Every structure is written in C-alpha cells, then in structure tokens.
Amino acid sequence: MTDIFLSYASEDRERVRPLAEALETKGYQVWWDRGLAAGDDYARVIGAALEQARLVIVCWTPASVASIWVRDEAARARDAGKLVPVMLDQCPIPLGFGAIQAEDFSRWNGAPDAAQMQLLHEAIKARLEGRAVDAGAVAGKRARLGRRIRLVTALTTVAALVGIAAGVSTILNHRRQAAQPPVTAELGLAEQLLQLVRDGTITPEQAIELARILESGAFEGGQATVPESAGPQPPSLDVALANAASVDPIEFSALARELYRANVESLLRSADPLVREAALALSSASTRAEAFDTLWLAAEAGAPEAHAIWLVCGAVGYATQNPRGLEALERARQADPNNFAVWRLLGYAYAQTDRLTQAQGTALVGAGLAAQEAQEPDTAEKHLGQALPALEDPLARSFVQAELGDVALARGESVLAAERFQQALQMETDAPDAAGGEAYPDLEASAEMMRLSVRQRYALALDDAGREREACIQLRAAAQAGQALTEAPPALLTRCGVTAPLLAPPPTGPAGEPAPDRASNTQAEPVRGPSRALSPQPREPQPGAPGPRPPPQPAP
C-alpha cells in the first residue's frame, strides 16, 4: 500500500517534484503518476492509486484550484478522512476545503529539512500512526519556525536551465550592448536570461539560476572565497552549533554566498530597472561600487526589495571590503533579527575590527537561533544566555531576552516565559533613546514592531499561566498600534474582545503575484521588520483580486 498520493495539476509537475523527493527522503512511499505507461487507463490507474493510498496530499495552486481532476481527488480524500493539503501558492482554496489546515509551502526553499517539511512530516506521521495531532504544540512550533526559515541554497526546478555554462563576463558584455537585437532561439540561454532581466519578465526559477552564474563575479577578489583544499563544507547551521562563540573565514564564505544566492533573485525581478541593472553590475569589480550606491539609495528610498538589498549589500559588501558592508549587515539584522546567518556574519565582521566582545556575543546569538531551528532548546538557551551580557545594543538585548522567553514557552514553562518576555519589554522600552543620535532613522519603528511581537508572545505566556486578565491587557495594548496581530491565537483575541486585524495582506512580487521566499528565507519576509525603509511593503491589491480569507482551522 502506498503511503502518500500526491494530487496536483499537470502544469505544476516540476514544482511538485521536489516535494515528492523530499517525502521519499523521509522514508515514505509516494505515488505521483510517474509510472504511467502508454496505453494505461489514466482514470482507472489514478483512481486505484488514490483508493489505496493511506494519505492524500493535495498541492493547491491557481492551476490545481481550477482543475476538476484535483478538486475531485481532494473531495474523495476529504470524505475518506485522509486529506492533507499544502499550499504551493497563496491562492483562494476551493469551497469545501477551507476548514482543513493547509501547510504554507509558498515560500519553501526545497530543502527536505526546512521548517515547512518539519511541520508536514509531523502531521503525516501522526495521521499514519492513527493518533491525533497536538494542535497546540504544532501551532506553537509553526509560529516559531515561521519566524526563522533556514538559510539554504534555493532549489531550482527548471531542467532546461541546468546546462547553462556561460560565464559572468559573457553576460556582462551582452548587458553593455545598448542596441542588442531581440533574443532569438539561436542565442544562448544565458543571453536569454539577461534579456528577461532587462524586460522585467524573468521567473523566480530563472532568476535563481542566473544568480548562481553571477555569484563568482560578485565575490571576486574578496574574502568570501573557500580554499579548494577545504573540501565539501558541512551545512552552515551545523557549523554555527559546533563553533558557537566564533566564526571562521570558511563559515563566513559559505554564509555570505548563501545569503547572496537566496536574495539577489528578488533584485533581478524588481519592478525598478535600476535595481535590476545594479544587481547585475554587482558581479563585476569595475561596476560594483556604482551598483552598491544605486542599491543603497533604492533601499533608503523605500524600495519593496529593501530588505533583500541590505542582505545582498551586507554579504557582498563586507566580503569585498566595501566600507559600508558592515552597516548593511547591521541594517539587515535590525530588519530581520530572526536570521541566524546575519548574526553569524556580524560576529565575523566585528572580530575583524577588534570588537571582540561584541563579536562573540553576536556569534553566540546566531548559534542560539540555529539551535532553536534545529529543535535543540537546551543548547539554544545556553548560547543565548551566554550572548546576553556581551550585547551593547538595547534592541538586540531585548530580542535575545524574548527568544529566551520562546524557549521557556516551548518547554511549557509559562511562568518563566512570562518573566522573560516582561524583561524583554523593559529592555526595549528605552532602546531608541539609548542608541542616541547615532541610531538609524528607522530604529524607533523597529522598536515598535518588536514591542508588538513581544507583547503577543507575553500574552500567550500569561494566558498559559492562568493569568487571562493580564494577557488581555497586553493584547489590547498591542492592538492599539493598529498592526495585524499575527502571533496571538484567534480564540484568545476573541476572549479578550480584541478586534484588531488578525492577518496582514500577503506580500506581492514584481507582477502582483505572491512574493517568493527571500531567504532564506532564510529569507522569508521579515516578521518584525522596522519600517518601510527596511522591509518590503505589501502593495495595493489588484483590481478584482479577492480579499484576504480567514485562516483554515486546525486539522482534526
């Protein structure tokens, strides 16, 4: 008997392939119609496989929502009690399926050990073992993992692009030709990718492949070059855990390059042609400084890709001795303090400027966040606790103290968690004043966003500790900020009489489509970014676009 039947639209086959392969690496037997031979009765074979499968994973996309085959398969699975939906895109789910919790894979980076796969694996395992899913535990893990998506190399799914061998110099030479004729089938794929960037029509998968081609030029002549003798490198997260208090050049190189690959694709897809051109120009030493200036000005002007700009400029800038590379890394940390890679890169950068105490503290924070992601709460608590005395920035101290609250909350120590969140709020209160005139202009907004998040988590801890009245006071204070309360359970908001918006509108990409993962998503969109100047902003809804729908209910 097959463990899992994958239901999807034929147009999404290559997007579903990484999911099928990731499930197979977990030991599941997956059926996704690869074995259909000529002459097979399609409907009969599909129906038999659907009937025999123990679970059915339906992959929702605009194409599958419109497919009568997928909707029929989903309905049969739902009626048989074996439906497990995932969302490859943020799209309206068909009527009749909205009450079933669907895991959000719209920003999945393709890694089998990514946060989304951890949650899906837990749900599948519980269903196959015939036990109920601990909805509370899963909800807590979903909130934590949603704030911290692991930074790994994005997985490309376009096989036609695998054979691209054109070098960076070839791409840049074509880019400099002002009157290039229209691209034809005879020209190389690299040139076609370049033209797509110029036209602003490059797809996420194509941009990922182009980013890989540009990478060597972006870091040429810098300190992010791994010696050939070093051999294959272990995952960056494992390195962070093994060398918690320091960052060596090899880890810095790996993290900087991963950060670049995971974020430059969004710059190549920007609606602003100046940003697209600057992203290309980063890959040439002769044009890198001017490109850096262009991207910096765009980010400070509030470009939708500002957060990705700080990450790319931080990684490439510091690696190639640009004097503003360190500042870009600091801005990236403020925009998304949950990104363990940025803390680790800062640990290396501070050490190179003899700020040894600060270097050790930031490196330890990165190791603590990596441990949280690896589901090692005791190790996370140790590293974060060691980091706290070494941090000078009040906002950074507040963030770390709140992360320690998360560790306690995950272990069910609600009283201790509440104490830590309360201390985090106190640390944060005077953060902008403590930073003085040297602070970035958006530091106050960053503090406000952090306060909003910590208040919601503080309320969760208070409620778990049986202090509902105090929890409601915190939620009402958070609601006064007028922002979406994304970390508080709707049931608690209802009990407290809080009517603030529960969900923020999803971010959109250059053409109005849902934005892809940035990073790391690592880069996901920053959950607690400081302001318009530092984090991507949702665009106005397109005419006729459906409004936000309420979140699906937890699976039984």
Image (cartoon, helix red, strand yellow):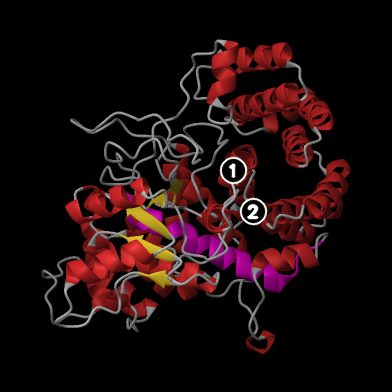
Q: Are marks 2 and 1 in contact (CB under 8 Å)?
A: yes
The residue stretch that appears in magenta: 246-271
Res 211 visible: no
Q: Is residue 214 above or below residue 339?
A: below
Q: Which residue is mark 1?
A: 336
The residue under label 2 is 342
Q: Secondary structure at mark 1?
A: loop
- List x then y, in percent, for residue 325: 60, 55
Q: Please tell me whether residue 98 is drawn above or below residue 436 in the rendered image.
A: below
Q: Position of residue 528 (x, y in %)?
A: 58, 35
Picture coordinates of residue 118, whole percent (x, y): 58, 56
Q: Secondary structure at mark 2?
A: helix
Mark 2 residue crowding within 10 angstroms, few (<14) / some (14–19) / many (20+): many
Q: Nearer the viewer, residue 528 or 362?
A: 528
**Label 2 is placed on what type of residue?**
Val
For the point 52% across and 74% down, the residue is: 220
Horizontal side of residue 506 vs 402, given as left or right: left
Q: Main secondary structure of the magenta part?
A: helix
Classify residue 82 as left or right of residue 147: left
Amino acid of disc 1: Asp
Residue at the image point whose x is 14% and y is 71% from the top: 183
